[in-house]
Image (tube, rainbow, N blue to C red):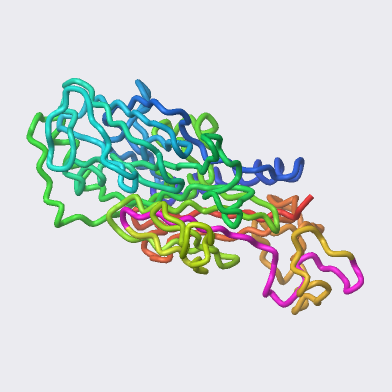
Amino acid sequence: MKMSLHARLDRWSVSLACITWMTCLNSAQAAPATGHAIDGLAGSEFTFTAKAGSVSTADGNSVYFWGYAPGDGPAQYPGPTLLLVQGQQVAITLTNELPVATSLLFPGMNGKPSVTGGGTAGALTMEAVAGGPAVTYSFTASEPGTYQFYSGTQPDLQIEMGLVGTIIVYPSVAGVKIPNRAYGHTNTAFAHEYLFFLSEMDESIHVHVEKQVLTGQPIAVDMTRRSPVYWFINGRTAPDTMLGPGSEAPWLPAQPYDCMPIFQAGDDVLMRVVGGGRDPHPFHHHGNHARTVARDGRLLSSSATSGPDLQQFHFTVPSTPGGTVDAIFNWTGAGLGWDVYGHKPGDPLAPGEDPASHGLPFPVVLPNDQNLTFGQMFSGSPFLGASADLPPGQGGFNASGGFMYMWHSHNEKEIVNNNVFPGGLMTMALILPRQ
């Protein structure tokens, strides 16, 4: 049977992701994992240009979109992630190359941003008109946390088209950033942080808008008929979520942000989950519960000094449209009922190991090799950090003996690329033994 174009493209994408996994695993085996930081733009003054571009999807499609470009660069989906420090005075200058007026809103920032320039008054804020003068929005990043920014002009359409992004404000003392903390309190410390910007697109809306732009018609779309067919993490559909960032994937110029969490057992991993679209996206992280410490840039705290004492534990982050969640994930193998390292009772504890499971036997006897199907990520051993001989041509992408979990939308229709599985709002998390 002749393979369909979608199937061939999907197989190519999966093969490409496997190569990426192998590269990551080989790098991880060569050196201990170091603190992962989120990619973005630091500083206090930024220049955005609202313009059109194309988003690539892992099934080989290309979707017209509108996005915020940093300076004169290509439009990004989502917009550039801004990395700010608490107390900073921030100015963002917006120039508009789109055929419609657009603008910027910054929910969660205390006080109303001041606006200067040649904009016109819109329903929610001053707007940059098509081909008109720039508009500058200024505000103070007064509270640490994870936030969104997006267009305040016809947001039902313009957020769908891609005019949306993330702001991260790091805590500070006397204007100096506190390293490796989501908020000022010590119970928000982390070793690694990852952004999970969750969104969706209805391709038919984008095609309709593109046709109207090309023919010079007024932009008019019936948003009541919206039905998304693509779902994204950080602007990418799986398995492209697992490709490298920025220059490591130059064929994705509009989508520079990757998302493949890699960390060691026992590490605190900060998950910054952003509901960047119009739909809810329950984000399920296999392997363990996560400790939700903040929502919408506000610590879950009963008082100014108590830290996240109202924190909640979730096995699925309830990501809502326009909202953000900061959750801390930590994996030690606790609760599995067996020693993930294969220790005997008298062996010393490994760093990051759960003491309660130390020395407990593996609960099953593995079948003989000829009765097993070997996945590409199986190291030949069920134990963390261990590998064993594999039959020729079987497996081999996991020389470090890491454990891999799928992290994905728990709305199952969202883990496809236009009805082709696997894809969509999905990535993998790799847990490595501590060095």
Tell me which residue sits at (71%, 43%) in the image: 26
Tell me which residue sits at (35%, 55%) in the image: 323
Whether the magenta-drawn stretch holds residue 283 is answered as no
Percent position of residue 138, x then y:
31, 31
Question: From the viewer's perspective, is residue 81 above or below residue 344?
Answer: above
The magenta-colored residue range is 321-347
Tell me, yes or no, if residue 61 can be seen here.
Answer: yes
Q: Which quadrant, please, contains the N terminus? A: bottom left
Q: Quadrant of residue 340?
A: bottom right
Find the residue positioned furthest to the left: 218
Percent position of residue 357, x then y:
76, 74
Could you say which is closer to the camera, residue 102 or residue 366? 102
Percent position of residue 46, x then y:
37, 26
Question: What type of secondary structure mainly makes up the magenta span?
Answer: loop
Q: Judge left or right: residue 147 versus residue 261.
A: left
Find the residue positioned furthest to the right: 346
Could you say which is closer to the camera, residue 97 or residue 421? 97
Q: Quadrant of residue 99?
A: top left
Q: Judge left or right: residue 263 versus residue 167.
A: right
Could you say which is closer to the camera, residue 134 or residue 98? 134
Whether the magenta-drawn stretch holds residue 330 is answered as yes
Question: From the viewer's perspective, is residue 95 above or below residue 293?
Answer: above
Tell me, yes or no, if residue 2 can be seen here.
Answer: no
Percent position of residue 308, x then y:
52, 61
